[in-house]
Image (spheres, rainbow, N blue to C red):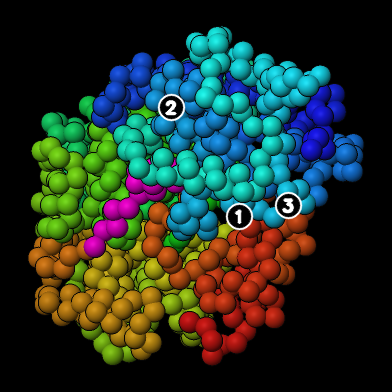
Amino acid sequence: MPPKLVPDILLAKSFKAGAWRGSYGLVGHTADVVNAVTTLVDTLGDRLIEQFGLQCSLAELKVTARLSAYIHDWGKANDHFQGVVRAKMPNASPQRYLPDSPQMIRHEVASVLLAWEFREWLQNQGDFLTAVVAAGGHHLKLGGRDGKCTDEFGEIRASGDDRIHLYVLDAVDGKIQYNPHFRQLLKYGIKALGLPQTIKLARKPSITWSVSQIKEKQFEIQDFLTDRQVDPVVLAVIKALLIAGDAVGSAIPNTKLSIQHWITEQIQRTLDENKLQQVINARLNGKELRPFQIQLAQSSARVTLARAGCGTGKTLGAYKWGQSKAIGRKMIFCYPTTGTSTEGFLDYVHHQVDSVLLHSRADVDLEMATTGEEEEVGETNDEANLKLESFQAWGKEAIVCTVDTVLGLLQCNRKSIYCFPAIAQAAFVFDEVHCYDDRLFGALLRFLAVVKAPILLMSASFLPWQKEAIATAVGEPIEIISGPVEIEQQPRYRFHFAKTPDWERVERELQTGGKVLWVCNQVNTAIAVYQEAKAKGFNTLLYHSRYRYQDRVRHHRDVVDAFKPEQQKPVLAIATQVAEMSLDLSATLLISQIADPAGLIQRLGRLNRRYCGRALDAVFYEDEKKGYPYSEKELNDGLRLIQSFTGEVCQGDLARWLESSDDKGNPDLQSVLLDGNWRTYSTSLREAGNNITALLEQDLNTVKSLRAKELPRYTVPIPTKNTHKWERYKFYPVAPKQQWSYSAELGAYELKEENSR
């Protein structure tokens, strides 16, 4: 059967009329990606081997990575792909180019099948098995769907055609010979990779594949890949190099930049001692470093644990640690939420060193000069913006981000892999480790086991099982450095327990000019308390997660500004769990519902944060809803924590109480990148949350006029109940206006009150 389309050239991507570049062709794009991957390996050099403890030489890694880059897009040489890519071009003729249905198989699956037919020739260069597995996974779609393993070696989709025509061989005058366009690709391999000039194969490559032939090849290759073991870390590094190289190899040719020059220039920008000293001097403001901070810098261990509470200066100590561990590297500071990462960026490295803030809403935060916080961090699905944002990290000396940006590498998250060239030469600081759920902590343990870089872990407390798990993962001596005793022993709190809220105590505090923080467990509870406080005539602010993001950062800034020492006006701020990490404020009275012990300690970190010289009151009361988002055990443990103390309480008391617990976590150590072998797909780094990021139906007319990167301004976290039934816009579910209403003051609220929490 002749092909529907006889192309004048094999394309790798579509292009606009009059904008042709050689890089849009399959041979040109292949050369660009091979160039990008080669430059990455050459520029990172032995740091790649050291950073991941690879059991191969740099030369061996390079030749296999180049082979993977060479074959990664071979599968585009078929009539389905060529028809689809041409149909996307301006003035294309759908009747001529577009197949009757979508492509039967994804092009990267076709690349694996085609490379398999040429395996006798390709096996002369590097580790063929590793190269072909990496090539098959370079779009993170192999072996999984919707974040779950399907054990599927490429989906075969319904198509109007019963077969795919391959532009590999042609029948000319009754003779079978290589297609002239594919021959160019083979010649490039001979010239650039040193492949044999004579292509000897056991049998001729295919001209067409039927569905049954595709299935037969898939089963054969899948069995072959499953039965043979490759080095999982070497494979992971080559996958990451290929995906990052493909991204930059696709983007840079659209500019006038040289791939080799751009990559080299970006990667070679690293920290020196003077630049970190600028950060330290700006924060010290003439004061002396504390002994604890100097100890961090003097740690001889590759992995160091800083156990210190709020206000002890551990973040400044981390930058001092960087002076001894991050010189000649990039330094990546990882926070658990977008808000804490923004706050850390603005407070420390912004304008001090060549730095970047990376999270999905960074542009909004920086533009509004504020510090929002996100309970559940997700990745944008706008591929172009995601790549461009990730490229920023390549050339920065200091990177402040959510922990997802780094640990997401283990679950094949796109942003993480696009940031791989920065991760591959960095020293790392992970803050607020005690906030990690079991899945996130498991990812941290796998990272510690594989990545041999200098790493600093910071937390108010480390449980005995956590310290043991960390030491086992690291596999070499670690050092634990505690914060200054004199600060942790300051009597900061007095605990009180009540069945119901104590409004009289709040009123007395406000009458004396106090600053009160009230933390609730649910958004609707916070809204109800806010409305009651307003009815009483109090100066009241509301802050929770269920706002449009652009409104949320305003509420955040209003609360932080109202608690500044120079603001003399008394204020009552009512918040949810968003207060636990992102709010840098010092209250004179804390009112809080009982929550889990770790959450209560985080809330206490907002009380008497700037120590006033004496203990201040924290009043706790029961949550009548008894659950959501906490289990019964967590609430009982929280009550037990409160009732364990009488008199004055210090931060050290709280840390010791937590560390005396015999509870053990159950960290999830599974990693798609390290354990998946040929399977390469994105899955969640964190445990499933209670919210999903959505748009409001009433905002659709506005957001449809916005660029993709501006959409986060209008996103709202909504409880996941029944959201699978909602329509979607740009990958976001849309909350129906008959179910969800909104006000800039109160945020989003469910119109059927009996169904909301």
Q: Are marks 3 and 2 in contact (CB under 8 Å)?
A: no
Taking the view exactly as shown, the residue that stands out farthest to the front is 174
Query: Circle 2 sits on which residue?
Result: 128
Residue 313 visible: no
Q: In whole angstroms, how far apart are the C-alphas of marks 3 and 2? A: 31 Å
Q: Earlier in the sequence, mark 2 or mark 1?
A: 2
Dot 3 falls on a residue whose secondary structure is loop
In the rendered structure, the answer to whether residue 224 lies left or right of residue 482 reads right
The circle drawn on residue 291 is none
Closer to the camera in the image, 109 or 661 = 109
Closer to the camera in the image, 267 or 658 = 267
Q: Residue at x 28, y 36 (%)?
A: 451
Q: Is residue 743 above or below residue 674?
A: below
Query: Circle 1 sits on which residue?
Result: 712
Q: Which residues are magenta?
A: 666-680
Closer to the camera in the image, 132 or 657 = 132
The amino acid sitting under disc 3 is: Ser
Q: Position of residue 117 (x, y in %)?
A: 55, 30
Q: Position of residue 658 (x, y in %)?
A: 16, 65
Q: Earlier in the sequence, mark 3 or mark 1?
A: 3
